Image (tube, grey):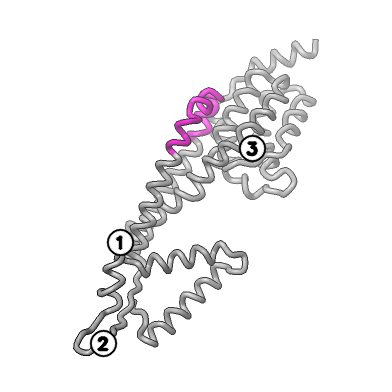
């Protein structure tokens, strides 16, 4: 009898767009703030889902079980989590507490693969491409650089909310069908990101070697006579590679690397080896 009443209550409530927005906003604000090393993003998921779960589960015991279920270990890229939690909410709404194990299995099975895609697109390519474009415009004295970065991040926020709706309405079907396409898109975005970074190294990193060698009446300029013949922007590329290797070494922090670059620049310019 109790089960019949509970299922009827579940059927009565239909998750609204306002509910979905509330869950998405709460999660995206608190995903990192509630992070811990035991269950990682689990508390953020439980906190964001709790209000709408209260509406779905009228029975107190079922509500507690559903919320506790979301306290379990969970970790994925915040943006991609919007799709996962959207699909999870659809399962909670449709199947009720019977879907508790399925909800946990869904999150566990998707958080790893989507984190791989999300980390590449969101944590690496997005700030690299948009930050590089905005930074380059700022270096040229164009105030649009800051505006472009601000607008891009505002648009990115609404993308997170939209992805929650996509996960809710399409569920696992869309994620499964996009599996191969996401890989192709990630590779294409990686190539574009590397192209942008390569172009910025050649145009933004300013370093040259004005050293000249005198052989009788013949003068050989190290920069124009050798380096530019081998590869234009060779020194900026070598400097970037050196910094990249140092940052990969645990003994070197970004602050140490910056101080090293300043020291090398001062000494090299003083001795006439480098010219900015």
Q: In this view, does 248 lie to the left or right of 40?
A: left
Reading the image, the residue beneath label 3 is 48
Q: Nearer the viewer, residue 212 or 129?
A: 212
| Residue 146: quadrant of the picture | bottom left
When the figure is inspected, residue 118 is found, relative to residue 255, above or below; the finding is: above
Q: Where residue 180 appears, x then y in whole percent?
A: 48, 31
Reading the image, the residue beneath label 2 is 214
Q: Is residue 184 left or right of residue 18?
A: left
Q: Where residue 212 appears, x then y in whole percent?
A: 28, 83
First to last magenta residue range: 162-185
| Residue 76: quadrant of the picture | top right
Label 3 secondary element = helix
Sequence-first disc among 3 and 2: 3
| Residue 78: quadrant of the picture | top right
Q: Where residue 19 appears, x then y in whole percent?
A: 58, 30
Instruction: Please check the rendered image and state whether residue 165 is part of the magenta-colored stretch, yes or no.
Output: yes
Gap between marks 3 and 2, in whole Å? Answer: 72 Å
């Amino acid at each position: 009898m109790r089960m019949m009443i509970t299922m009827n209550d579940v059927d009565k409530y239909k998750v609204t767009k306002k509910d979905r927005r509330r869950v998405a906003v709460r999660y995206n604000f608190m995903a990192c703030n509630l992070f811990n090393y035991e269950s990682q993003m689990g508390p953020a998921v439980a906190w964001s889902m709790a209000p709408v779960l209260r509406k779905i589960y009228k029975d107190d015991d079922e509500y507690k079980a559903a919320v506790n279920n979301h306290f379990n270990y969970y970790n994925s890229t915040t943006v991609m989590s919007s799709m996962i939690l959207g699909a999870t909410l659809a399962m909670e709404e449709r199947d009720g507490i019977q879907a508790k194990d399925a909800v946990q299995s869904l999150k566990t099975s998707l958080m790893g693969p989507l984190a791989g895609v999300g980390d590449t697109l969101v944590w690496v390519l997005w700030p690299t491409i948009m930050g590089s474009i905005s930074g380059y415009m700022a270096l040229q004295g164009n105030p649009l650089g800051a505006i472009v970065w601000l607008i891009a991040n505002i648009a990115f926020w609404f993308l997170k909310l939209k992805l929650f709706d996509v996960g809710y309405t399409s569920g696992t079907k869309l994620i499964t069908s996009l599996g191969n396409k996401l890989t192709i898109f990630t590779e294409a975005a990686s190539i574009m990101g590397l192209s942008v970074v390569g172009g910025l190294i050649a145009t933004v990193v300013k370093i040259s070697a004005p050293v000249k060698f005198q052989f009788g009446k013949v003068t050989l300029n190290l920069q124009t006579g050798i380096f530019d013949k081998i590869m234009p922007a060779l020194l900026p590329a070598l400097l970037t590679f050196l910094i990249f290797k140092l940052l990969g070494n645990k003994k070197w922090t970004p602050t140490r690397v910056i101080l090293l670059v300043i020291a090398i620049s001062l000494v090299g310019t003083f001795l006439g080896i480098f010219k900015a």
